[in-house]
Image (cartoon, rainbow, N blue to C red):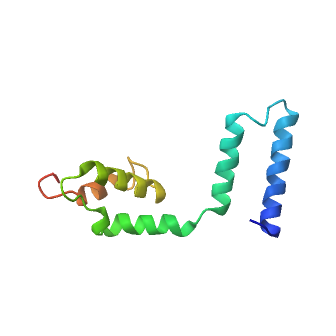
Amino acid sequence: MKGPKVEDWAEVQQEFMNERKSTGRLVTFESHWRDFEKAFKNTFMDIGEGVKAENNLKSLNKSLKMTSGNIDSYIATFMKLLKMAGYEETKHGSLELFKKGLPTGLNI
């Protein structure tokens, strides 16, 4: 990735890292890299990805229906879309969305 916006962002990150180093924190600390990764994702993430995931959750299309009794696959797919859409498991009506993808016998 190159360009003025990327260079500006990288410069800010370098300043942040230098500031942390000047306070005695080593660059190799795991928390530093978590902060860097979070800053990167917040800056360069594909906002369309979250919107698509939210649309999939709300429309409950075929890709989000439990099929062939495979509850593990359904749960894994649902949780992935939930996270991508920025939903929390206990908020935004997540349980209701989850239940809509279950077969009638399991949806109580």
Of 72 and 107, which appears nearest the observer?
A: 72
Lateral position of residue 108 relative to residue 63, left or right: left
Does residue 8 appear left or right of residue 63 in this picture? Answer: right
Residue 19 spot, x, y in % from top left: 85, 41
* Above or below, comparing residue 108 to residue 2 in the picture: above
Seen in the picture, residue 96 relative to 54 is either above or below; the reply is above
- Tell me: 55 left or right of 100: right
Q: Residue at coordinates 84% horizontally, 36% vertically from top-left?
A: 21
What residue do we see at 82% from left, 62% from top? 7
Q: Quadrant of the N terminus?
A: bottom right
Q: What residue lies at 27% left-to-right and 68% top-to-bottom? A: 62
Q: Residue 92, image x and y in percent?
A: 39, 55
Residue at the left extreme, as displayed: 105
Q: Residue furthest top?
A: 24
Q: Nearer the viewer, residue 70 or 59?
A: 70
Q: Which x, y percent locates residue 27?
A: 78, 37
| Figure disc tally | 0
In which quadrant of the rendered view does residue 94 lie?
bottom left
Q: Position of residue 50 (x, y in %)?
A: 50, 64
